[in-house]
Amino acid sequence: MIENTLENNVAHITGIVESELSFHHEVYGEAFYQFYLKVPRLSESFDSLPVTISERLILEEGITVGQRLSVLGQFRSYNNYITEGNRLLLTIFAREYTVLDPDSFVKNPNNLFVNGFLCKKPVYRTTPFGREICDLLVAVNRAYNKSDYLPCIAWGRNARYCENLAIGENIKIWGRIQSREYQKKTDEGTLTKIAFEVSVCKLEI
């Protein structure tokens, strides 16, 4: 059962470490740390993605800013009970990592595959520039009867196809994990926040 849930959610990202390790949480005496990985896009821009890793996986030389890492793991969600507002926290949960040569070539540095179920009605819309988008929320089973809830965005023909999908539909998605800045109005003014989501390249029902 655990093997099947591992195969339902596979993330593989490669990039440059851009933040120091910071303590994230502890489970049964095992400490977990978080850092951000700067992952290139084809457009020559970057995604800044959070990675969570167990202390038991960190190699003796540690993880330092400027290192080039290849990280294999899962894209996971957690409930945030500390702050108000968006209570869904998203992170790449590392299962292993490799330190790479700074000049080594990686054809596709941002890959994700998930196999899950639609848990919310798809929301189809068009941007001010006429681009078609469909927002999906996909629940992916995890071991020990847990699930990850992953926001996904389909584009163009995929967006039109997803518009009428039913809640509960089993969906397989291939894509990449992206970071996106957005503005949120508060009593103190407008804040710039960062959302993490799956940009859908290919899907199957």
Image (cartoon, grey):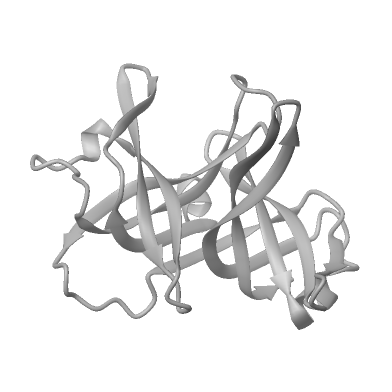
Compared with residue 20, is residue 12 higher up or lower down, i.e. above or below? below
Image coordinates of residue 178 in percent, x first then y, are 54, 60
The answer to which of 44 and 21 lies nearer the viewer is 44
Q: Is residue 143 left or right of residue 67?
A: right
**Looking at the image, which residue is at 75% across and 37% down?**
185
Side (left or right) of 103 relative to 149? left
Q: Position of residue 138 (x, y in %)?
A: 70, 53
Residue 200 at x, y percent in the picture? 63, 70
**Residue 69, relative to residue 5: is it above or below?**
below
The residue sitting at 67% across, 59% down in the picture is: 152
Total tally of numbered discs in the picture = 0
Residue at 34% across, 80% down: 107
Q: Quadrant of residue 109?
A: bottom left
Residue 135 placement (x, y as % from top left):
77, 60
Q: Residue furthest left?
A: 61
Instruction: Quadrant for the C terminus, please.
Output: bottom right
Q: Nearer the viewer, residue 28 or 130?
A: 130
- Is 120 placed left or right of 27 in the picture? right
- Looking at this view, name the residue that lies furthest to the front: 189
